[in-house]
Amino acid sequence: MRRLAASGVLLGIALLLIVPLDAQDLSDRAKQIGGKFMCMCGCSQVLTQCNHVGCTTSSSMLKELNQSLASGGSETAITQMFVQEFGTKVYAEPPKSGFSLVAWTLPSVYLALGTVLVVFVISRWRKHALEPVAGTGNAAAIPQELLERARARAARETED
């Protein structure tokens, strides 16, 4: 019975280490806002999905987030607080305003430019493929002596 109780206590402690207490009681709004930030422990994971055992950074950030929401803080105020504390690297995705808008538009611009470039190159290849090759049909460009030798060799090799 003691072993069963001890194993239950160990299992409980292990669960507490795996899932931080602050992540257990997050509201839907806190999860939504926390999903917009990165954990600053260096794991390169979203704040609400950091799965490091005993990660103190994510638990403290989630605690700050919960406290700000409990005191009536708005999403923009919380965002500004995290940006002031950690810098713009706290964003999980760049904001869709100002210079960061370039990060959102450039992939589309590159895709359009790449498509135009591929169409241009393929049309040039097709155009050149349909043109006759210079020198074909012009027997005067081959010396008569070489032409006669080639014909004689072809005749010898094809004799049965």
Image (cartoon, rainbow, N blue to C red):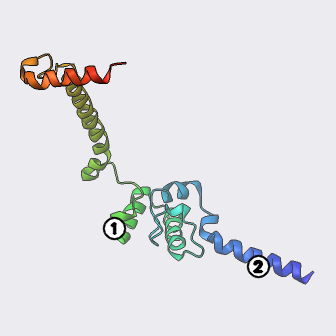
Residue 152, given in percent of the width and then of the height, sits at 21, 21
Marks 2 and 1 sit apart, C-alpha to C-alpha, by: 39 Å
- Judge whether 24 appears above or below 1 on screen: above
Closer to the observer: label 2 or label 1? 2
On screen, residue 108 versus residue 130, left or right, reads right
Q: Quadrant of residue 1?
A: bottom right
Residue beneath the point at 26% across and 39% down:
109
Q: Residue furthest right?
A: 1
Residue beneath the point at 49% across and 70% down:
61
On screen, residue 81 versus residue 127, left or right, reads right
Q: Which residue is mark 2?
A: 10
- Mark 1 surroundings: few (<14), some (14-19) or many (≥20) residues within 10 A: few
Residue beneath the point at 48% across and 68% down:
43
Please tell me which residue lies in front, 27 or 56.
56
Which amino acid is tagged 2?
Leu
Counting residues from the N terminus, which is met first, the one under dot 2 or under dot 1?
A: 2
Q: Which residue is mark 1?
A: 87
Which amino acid is tagged 1?
Gly
The secondary structure type at the circle numbered 2 is helix
Q: How many marks?
A: 2
Residue 24, given in percent of the width and then of the height, sits at 64, 65
- Mark 2 surroundings: few (<14), some (14-19) or many (≥20) residues within 10 A: few
The secondary structure type at the circle numbered 1 is loop
Residue beneath the point at 61% across and 71% down:
20
Res. 142 in view: no
Q: Quadrant of residue 140?
A: top left
